[in-house]
């Protein structure tokens, strides 16, 4: 399932980034929906998703602001699987947008029993780093302990990701952890 508000984004990805999408848009298993994600969640007949990844623009005021409000998160909470479902969304930079990260963290903590902030290196983002939230309805879920699994040939082909990189993404500086938990 892929929901995209702008069909031109999909067409541009197919044309300009074919190696990145690697034929995913031509896969018969894909259900591509060109519509607003908020409206889609309200009407889709699928009761639960195992994983929901929200790749929206920055969480600021403007036309996408509703993607960072309680109503949207409540819809997602009710749509991800109650035991093993997870939600992931971009959540800005822990150094540059500390207040916004805390606001999103507090909002998600009111809605989900499990909320983790993590970060990774992305050279094209400000200061070379971007943060994300991962949320779950499962009170025992700990995304930091998940590592590389599956077909060893696939794992051997990965260029960046390792189990150590995965665990490190959840290791926050002390001041960030204290700030979020305060």
Image: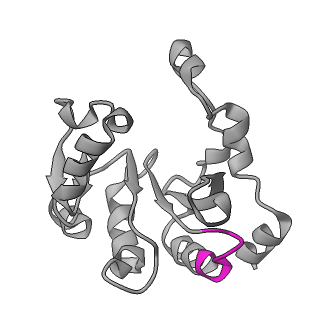
Where in the figure is residue 53, as x and y percent of width and height? 40, 53
> Would you say 22 lies left or right of 105 here?
left
- Which one is nearer the viewer's eye here, 144 or 161? 161
Whether residue 46 appears in this view of the structure is no
Where in the figure is residue 26, as x and y percent of width and height? 19, 32
- Residue sitting at the far right: 174
* Image quarter of the C terminus: bottom right
Whether residue 23 appears in this view of the structure is yes
* Image quarter of the N terminus: top left
> Would you say 64 lies left or right of 155 here?
left
Residue at horizontal 53%, vertical 76%? 110
Residue at horizontal 55%, vertical 63%? 113
- Which one is nearer the viewer's eye here, 46 or 12? 12
Where in the figure is residue 98, as x and y percent of width and height? 67, 77
**Magenta stretch, residue numbers:** 93-101
Q: Is residue 72 above or below residue 31?
A: below
Residue at horizontal 70%, vertical 52%? 170
> Would you say 17 lies left or right of 114 here?
left
Residue at horizontal 70%, vertical 39%? 165
Q: Quadrant of residue 163?
A: top right
Q: Is residue 57 above or below residue 128?
A: below
Q: How many marks?
A: 0
């Amino acid at each position: 399932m892929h929901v995209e508000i702008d069909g031109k984004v999909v067409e541009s990805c197919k044309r300009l980034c074919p190696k990145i999408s690697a034929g995913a848009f031509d896969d018969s298993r894909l259900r591509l929906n060109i519509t607003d994600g908020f409206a889609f969640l309200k009407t889709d007949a699928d009761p639960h998703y195992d994983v929901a990844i929200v790749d929206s623009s920055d969480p600021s005021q403007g036309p996408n602001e509703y993607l960072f409000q309680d109503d949207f998160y409540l819809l997602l909470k009710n749509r991800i699987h109650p035991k093993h479902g997870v939600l992931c969304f971009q959540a800005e930079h822990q150094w540059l947008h500390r207040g916004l990260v805390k606001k999103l963290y507090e909002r998600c903590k009111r809605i989900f029993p499990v909320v983790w902030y993590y970060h990774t290196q992305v050279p094209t983002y400000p200061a070379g780093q971007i943060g994300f939230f991962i949320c779950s309805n499962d009170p025992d879920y700990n995304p930091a302990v998940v590592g590389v699994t599956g077909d060893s040939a696939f794992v051997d082909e990965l260029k960046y990701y390792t189990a150590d990189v995965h665990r490190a993404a959840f290791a926050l500086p002390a001041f960030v952890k204290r700030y979020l938990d305060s």
